[in-house]
Image: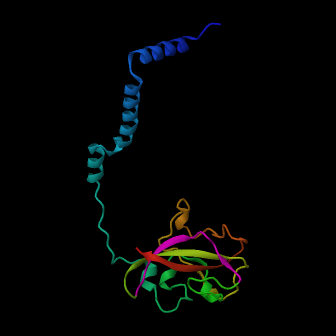
Amino acid sequence: MRVPLFDRVTETFTRHLASHSPRRQFLARFSTLVAGSGAFPLLPVQRAQAESRTVPPVQPNIASDFDRLAQSTDPTKCNYWRHCAIDGVLCGCCGGGVHTCPPGTQPSPVSWIGTCRNPSDGRQYVIAYRDCCGRTTCASTPDCHCNTADREMPIYRPQASNDIIWCFGTTSTAYHCSTAAIVGQA
């Protein structure tokens, strides 16, 4: 059987390399190459390019439309400050609270997030919006059906999208209402 040319050349090169270089030296050079290739993007050229971009300064006093109308007294209203990125029925109108599910429902283990400004102290907070699942949608007044899309992200960032029913991982995927729990200060 005739061996193809590529196989013969490869075999000859490999045998020559094995007979003329120590294996430890080969492994040392090869691992240096592999480890060094990870640092290639960190070269000074890359850093100089990154420094040339100007980042606009953060202006905390620029408020969104929701921020200008937000209130901090009634959590059963859509303009309550924590509801800046909520989409659904407020659990406070369904027998639950602003951050607790009503009896007979269970919170979904996943949530979407938003950053809302509290008008009382002027600080930004990260809010986790969690759907309560297990019963059909709460029958409440239309005032409790909120769809505030302040700073809403497109669907390619699903962790910040309020257009998804987040009842994954619960015993029932039936949507009931949504909560808004403070995760921490932004």
Which residue is drawn at the image coordinates 54% and 79% (left, top)? Answer: 180
88 w.r.t. 13: above or below: below
Which color mode does the image show? Answer: rainbow
Which is nearer the eye, 21 or 52?
Answer: 21
The residue sitting at the top extreme is 1
In the rendered image, the quadrant that contains the N terminus is top right
Q: Residue 49 location, x and y as percent? A: 29, 48
Image quadrant in which you'd find residue 138: bottom right
Up-down: is 110 above or below 12?
below
Q: Is residue 138 left or right of residue 178?
A: right
Image coordinates of residue 178 in percent, x first then y, are: 61, 79
**105 over 34 or under it: above or below:** below
* Tally of marks: 0
Looking at the image, which residue is at 26% across and 44% down? 44
Residue 167: image quadrant is: bottom right
Residue at the bottom extreme? 73
Residue 46 falls left or right of residue 167 = left
> Which residue occupies 44% across, 79% down?
65
Q: Locate residue 61, reporting x and y percent.
A: 33, 78
Rendered-image quadrant of the C terminus: bottom left
118 is within the stretch colored magenta: yes
x%, y% of residue 7?
55, 14
Provide the residue span drawn in magenta.
Answer: 104-119
Task: Report if residue 109 lies within the magenta region.
Answer: yes
Q: Which image quadrant for residue 59?
A: bottom left
Of 99 and 66, which appears nearest the observer?
99
